[in-house]
Image (cartoon, helix red, strand yellow):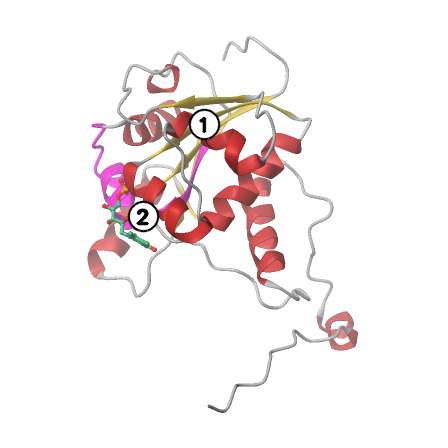
C-alpha cells in the first residue's frame, strides 16, 4: 500500500440513521488526534436531514460539514459529494486505513451488503471490502427485521465489522455525552486508534464501589 504522507487515513460516512451526536463526536476526536493525518468525509442526503433534525445543523454545501461539526478549520478533512463516484475514495488505488459508516442506516447496510455502488458511500465501502480494508458499519435501527439481520450477516461474511450503535450502561456513565463518547471510543479502537482515556471494565469488585448512574425521578403530571 503506497501512502503519500505520515499518519492514518480514514473515511467517515454519515447516513440517515439516528445518532448524529455520535458522528459529531467521532469527527471531533479524529480532528484532534495527531495519529490521524487525513479524514475523507461523505454524507448522504438523508444523513444531512438527520444532522439538521438532531443537531440543528444546516449547510448549503455538505462539504462544509466537517468544519461546522468540529467547530474548527477541519484542515485534515477532505469532504466529497455523495454523488461524486469519481472521488479519490472510489478507487482502490487510493489508500485508506479503513472506513466507518456512523450512523449506518439499514438502507445503506442493504446497499453495502448487496454490492450496490451507485453512490460514493456504497462505492467506497465496496472498495474497502474488495481491498480487504477495515469497514465498520455502525448500524442503528430497532427493532430489526429478518432482512436487516440477513444483510448484517452478508456484510460481516464479506469482511465488515458490524458495530450497532448500542451504548454501554455499565461503565460509570453519568450522561448522554458519556454514553456517546464511550461508544465512539469503542469504534476508534476498532479503527486501530487506542483510547487510553476510555473507561474499561475493572471487574465486578471495583464496580460495586462505583456510584451508579443517577436516573431522574419521573414527573407526576
Ligand atoms: C429523523 C430521521 C431518523 C431516521 N432514523 C433512522 C434510523 O435510526 N435507522 C434507519 O435505518 N433509518 C432511519 N431513518 C430513515 C432513513 O433516513 C431512510 O431510510 C433513508 O432512505 C436512508 O438513506 P441513506 O442510507 O442513503 O442515508 C430516519 C429518517 C429520519 C428523517
For residue 100, above or below residue 151: above
Q: In which quarter of the view is residue 206 placed?
A: bottom right
Location of residue 66 in the rendering, given as x and y in whole percent from the top left corner: 50, 31
The secondary element bearing badge 1 is classed as helix
Location of residue 84 in the rendering, given as x and y in whole percent from the top left corner: 29, 20
Q: Given the current orientation, which residue lies at the most extreme bottom position? A: 220
The secondary element bearing badge 2 is classed as loop
Residue marked by disc 1 = 64
- Magenta segment: does it hold 101? yes
Indicate left or right for 48 with 194 as reference.
Answer: left
Q: In which quarter of the view is residue 112 placed?
A: top left
Residue at 61% x, 30% y is 72
Residue 190 visible within the image: no
Residue 133 is marked as: none
Location of residue 123 in the rendering, given as x and y in whole percent from the top left corner: 29, 26
Residue marked by disc 2 = 105
Residue 41 visible within the image: yes
Disc 2 beta carbon < 8 A from ligand 1?
A: yes
Q: How many marks?
A: 2
Indicate left or right for 127 with 177 as reference.
Answer: left
Residue at 69% x, 76% y is 212
Mark 2 surroundings within 10 Å by alpha-carbon count, few (fewer than 14), some (14 through 19), many (20 or more): many
For residue 176, above or below residue 105: below
Q: Which residue occupies the foreground of this view, 214 or 7? A: 214
Q: In which quarter of the view is residue 140 placed?
A: bottom left
Circle nearer the viewer, 1 or 2? 1
Distance CA(mark 1)–CA(mark 2):
22 Å
Q: Which residues are magenta?
A: 99-118
- Magenta segment: does it hold 95? no
Residue at 40% x, 34% y is 59
Which comes before the other along the chain, label 1 or label 2?
Answer: 1
Amino acid at each position: 500500500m503506497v501512502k503519500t504522507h505520515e499518519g492514518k487515513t480514514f473515511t467517515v460516512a454519515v447516513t440517515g440513521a439516528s445518532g448524529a451526536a455520535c458522528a459529531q463526536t467521532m469527527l471531533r476526536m479524529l480532528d484532534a488526534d495527531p495519529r490521524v493525518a487525513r479524514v475523507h468525509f461523505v454524507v448522504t442526503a438523508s444523513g444531512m436531514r438527520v444532522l439538521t433534525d438532531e443537531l440543528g445543523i444546516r449547510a448549503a454545501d455538505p462539504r462544509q460539514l466537517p468544519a461546522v461539526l468540529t467547530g474548527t478549520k477541519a484542515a485534515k478533512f477532505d469532504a466529497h459529494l455523495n454523488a461524486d463516484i469519481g472521488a479519490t475514495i472510489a478507487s482502490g488505488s487510493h489508500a485508506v486505513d479503513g472506513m466507518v459508516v456512523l450512523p449506518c442506516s439499514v438502507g445503506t447496510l442493504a446497499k453495502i451488503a448487496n454490492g450496490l455502488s451507485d453512490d460514493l458511500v456504497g462505492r467506497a465501502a465496496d472498495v474497502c471490502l474488495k481491498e480487504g480494508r477495515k469497514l465498520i458499519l455502525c448500524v442503528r435501527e430497532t427493532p430489526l427485521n429478518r432482512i436487516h439481520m440477513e444483510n448484517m450477516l452478508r456484510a460481516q461474511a464479506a469482511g465488515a465489522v458490524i458495530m450497532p450503535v448500542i451504548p454501554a450502561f455499565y461503565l460509570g456513565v453519568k450522561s448522554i455525552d458519556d454514553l456517546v463518547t464511550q461508544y465512539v471510543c469503542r469504534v476508534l479502537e476498532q479503527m486501530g486508534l487506542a483510547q487510553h482515556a476510555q473507561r474499561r471494565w475493572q471487574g465486578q469488585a471495583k464496580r460495586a464501589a462505583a456510584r451508579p448512574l443517577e436516573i431522574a425521578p419521573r414527573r407526576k403530571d
